[in-house]
Amino acid sequence: MERPEALSAQVEFAVGDRKTFALPNHAAGGYRWTVDVSGESVTASLAYPETGPTPGLTDRLGQVLQLSGIRAGEAVLALEERRSWEQGTPADAVMVRVVVRLRDSDQRESSGVGRHG
């Protein structure tokens, strides 16, 4: 699992790869993260670490963002941290550009390199 600071303005990885990021945590105050994905190259989900949710433990660990590269391309993630009962400006908001690239082996195959025939 990568640390929150690893979730920068841009994340890059290959088709088939998965990445997990720990999100900044304010769960004790009732805050939860939401994620909206614009694009079809990645799936994103929010979860609790495998050790949670456990009372007390989850408050320290918080939510994690799980990304999976499903096809080459780009997507934009809009993450917001807010209390479900509050309207207006979120407590925190992060925009992340995700670039999913073909694996090196997939690029060689699609270009004909390494094929015998």
Image (cartoon, rainbow, N blue to C red):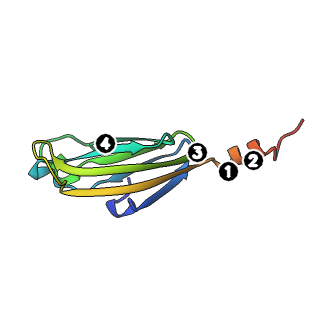
Q: Which amino acid does label 2 sit on?
A: Arg
Q: Where is residue 33 in the image (x, y as percent from the top left)?
A: 24, 47
In percent of width and height, residue 37 lies at 39, 43
- Label number found at residue 72: 3
- Marks 3, 1: nearer the viewer: 3
Mark pair 1, 4: CA separation: 29 Å
Residue at x-position 58% and y-position 45%: 72
Of the two numbered discs 3 and 4 on the same chain, state the one appearing first in sequence.
4
Which type of secondary structure does the marked residue at label 4 adopt?
A: strand
Query: Which mark is drawn over residue 46?
Result: 4
- Sort mark 2 into few (<14), some (14-19) or many (20+) by Cα contacts within 10 Å: few
Crowding near the residue tagged with mark 1, few <14, some 14–19, many ≥20 C-alpha atoms within 10 Å: few
- Mark 1 highlights which residue? 104
Residue 108: which disc?
2
Q: Is mark 1 on a helix, strand or loop?
A: helix
Sequence order check, earlier mark of 3 and 2: 3
What residue is shown at x 11% (from left), y 51% (from top)? Answer: 28
Q: Is residue 83 in view?
A: yes
Label 3 – label 4 distance at C-alpha: 22 Å
- For discs 3 and 2, the disc positioned in front in the rendered view: 3
Foreground mark, 3 or 4, reads: 3
Could you tell whether 74 is left or right of 22 in the image?
right
Mark identifier at residue 75: none
Q: Where is residue 54 in the image (x, y as percent from the top left)?
A: 17, 41
In 3D space, how far apart are the residues under numbered discs 3 and 2 (Cα atoms)? 14 Å
Amino acid type for the residue under numbered disc 1: Asp
Q: How far apart are marks 2 and 1 (CA)?
A: 6 Å
